[in-house]
């Protein structure tokens, strides 16, 4: 086994419009890079963090990467030490799973470095604990796809059970991140505490229909299910020109759906094929550009691998 390893953990799109807190998918980039090295000490030490503008703690007990890795080391009763350096290559407060990518990078790197004492799926609870520190609650809708790749569904939290769903061939994602920051806590505070029975039944029907569409590769059905009348209307107020962008994007040929990525302000579109998603991405980007709002656009296949070892 090597004494050091460098890994990458990808950004994600959570909720996917009809699956609040339970659906998510991974994209190829951006993401976080992390180097882990064996040391003669004990536990995790974070020596450096780049790309965070000084906002993240190097205290492993307060850092998502350190927390997930430390809990893993305790679970396997590892007596040695691990030194980490983290390079944040994605924005904060973006709705693209920044804290989840760090948590996944931490536990994935240590598991690989130590010869894979656990399967990749068994690492999920440790990544969730890292996410709990960042968000105040252990949601798996970002960490699951970042760790497992593809499209995932959190069937339950107690006990934690995550299902991997089929990825339709030729499905592409565009993620547009405006230069606006939205904290997950603020976005959650806007949500209703209770939901009417009629609305919840409709939401459940769309979620079930979306899952069916994935298994049958029915893109028409998928388009009809990517609807959210509960969460989206609340969070759309935090995102500049959201409904204008949504209408224009859904009118673009080949687009399957559009929505808020996680808690925002990033927005995503799904489309059938690279050409269709590239056009949709340009439509999304052009509206903000006309309004003088800078934004970053990411075009990607659905990432079916998740984290990976870098050379």
Image (tube, rainbow, N blue to C red):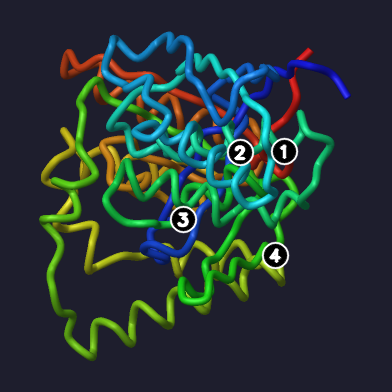
Q: Residue at x 36, y 50 (%)?
A: 132
44, 306: nearer the viewer:
44
Q: Position of residue 9 (x, y in %)?
A: 60, 31
> What whole-number distance in Å separates the C-alpha atoms at marks 3 and 1?
21 Å
Quadrant in the rendering for residue 39 = top right
Q: Residue at x 61, y 62 (%)?
A: 219
Q: Position of residue 291 (x, y in %)?
A: 16, 19
259, 78: nearer the viewer:
78
Q: Residue at x 54, y 28 (%)?
A: 44
**Mark 4 or mark 1, whichever is nearer to me:** 1
Pointers 2 and 1 in contact (C-beta within 8 Å): yes
Q: Could you tell me which secondary element the residue under label 1 belongs to?
A: helix
Q: Could you tell me which secondary element the residue under label 3 belongs to?
A: loop
- Residue highlighted by disc 1: 111
**Mark 2 or mark 3, whichever is nearer to me:** 2
> What whole-number distance in Å separates the C-alpha atoms at marks 2 and 3?
17 Å
> What whole-number distance in Å separates the C-alpha atoms at marks 4 and 1?
35 Å
> What whole-number distance in Å separates the C-alpha atoms at marks 2 and 1?
6 Å
- Mark 4: few/some/many CA within 10 Å (<14, 14-19, 20+): some
Q: Is residue 179 left or right of residue 277?
A: left
- Residue highlighted by disc 2: 107
Q: First in sequence, mark 3 or 1: give its number.
A: 1
Q: Quadrant of the C terminus?
A: top right
**Mark 4 or mark 2, whichever is nearer to me:** 2
The disc placed on residue 141 is: 3
């Amino acid at each position: 086994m090597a004494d050091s390893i460098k890994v990458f953990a990808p950004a994600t799109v959570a909720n996917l419009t009809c699956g609040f807190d339970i659906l998510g998918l991974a994209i190829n980039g951006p993401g976080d890079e992390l180097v882990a090295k064996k040391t003669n000490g004990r536990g995790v030490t974070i020596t450096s963090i780049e790309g965070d503008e000084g906002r993240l703690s190097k205290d492993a007990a307060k850092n998502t990467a350190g927390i997930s890795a430390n809990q893993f080391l305790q679970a396997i009763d590892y007596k040695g030490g691990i030194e980490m350096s983290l390079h944040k290559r994605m924005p904060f407060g973006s709705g693209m799973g920044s804290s989840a990518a760090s948590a996944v990078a931490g536990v994935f790197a240590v598991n690989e470095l130590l010869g894979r004492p656990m399967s990749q799926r068994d690492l999920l609870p440790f990544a969730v604990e890292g996410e709990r520190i960042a968000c105040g609650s252990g949601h798996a809708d970002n960490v699951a796809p970042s760790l497992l790749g593809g499209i995932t569904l959190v069937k339950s939290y107690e006990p934690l059970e995550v299902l991997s769903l089929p990825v339709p061939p030729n499905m592409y994602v565009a993620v547009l991140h405006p230069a606006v920051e939205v904290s997950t806590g603020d976005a959650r505070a806007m949500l209703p505490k209770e939901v009417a029975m009629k609305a919840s039944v409709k939401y459940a029907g769309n979620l079930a229909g979306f899952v069916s569409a994935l298994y049958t590769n029915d893109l028409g059905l998928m388009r009809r299910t990517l609807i959210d009348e509960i969460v989206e209307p609340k969070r759309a107020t935090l995102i500049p020109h959201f409904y204008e962008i949504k209408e224009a994007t859904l009118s673009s040929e080949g687009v399957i759906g559009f929505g808020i990525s996680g808690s925002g302000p990033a927005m995503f579109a799904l489309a059938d094929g690279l050409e269709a998603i590239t056009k949709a991405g340009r439509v999304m980007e052009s509206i903000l550009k006309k309004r003088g709002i800078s934004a970053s656009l990411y075009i990607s296949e659905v990432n079916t691998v998740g984290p990976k070892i870098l050379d």
